[in-house]
Amino acid sequence: TPAGWGGAGGRGAALGGRLDATNVVRPSLSMITSVGLEHQRVLGDTIEAITTEKAGVFKAGVPALVGPGVPLGVAREEASRRGAELLVLPAVEGEDVDDLNARLSREAMGILRDRGVAPFTSVTPEA
């Protein structure tokens, strides 16, 4: 999980959230890609409890991007409590997890570019 990115869509090595090792740095953007029950033993018994823990990456003055499967009520409450601007990626019907993660990544890069985070370079996929 890149520094400051809360959540790895179930594919990264990081736990995500309040207990994540990346939480020691001040990020330019915090992100929760998705919330699932894969970390119930550590993060909580419900999707809402896990979302609360994962929102531990939200920081005051730092935008927080969440994927469409993240419970918005909890994300809004935690963003407000922590002083983070919440940005929500809308759902796309029939989108698989790989396409969702690619779309989240593009959105995150756009947010960082628009906020002048440097150095920032655009990556164009090869044809």
Image (spheres, rainbow, N blue to C red):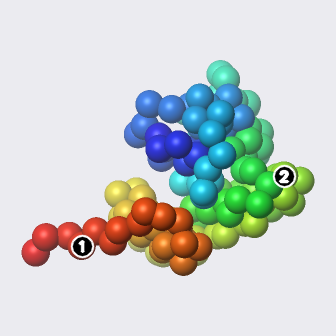
Left or right, 117 with reference to 86: left
Look at mark 2 in the image and give the residue it sits on.
Answer: 82
Q: Given the current orientation, which residue lies at the most extreme left position?
A: 127
Look at mark 1 in the image and give the residue it sits on.
Answer: 124
Left or right, 73 with reference to 39: right
- Of residues 53 and 27, which is closer to you in this image? 27
Left or right, 68 with reference to 73: left
Counting the numbered discs, the total is 2
Residue at image location 49% in from the left, 73% down from the top: 113
- The type of residue carrying mark 2 is Arg
Quarter of the image with the C terminus is: bottom left
- The type of residue carrying mark 1 is Thr
Label 2 sits on a secondary structure element that is helix
Residue 120 seen = yes
Label 1 sits on a secondary structure element that is loop
Q: Position of residue 116 (x, y in %)?
A: 54, 72
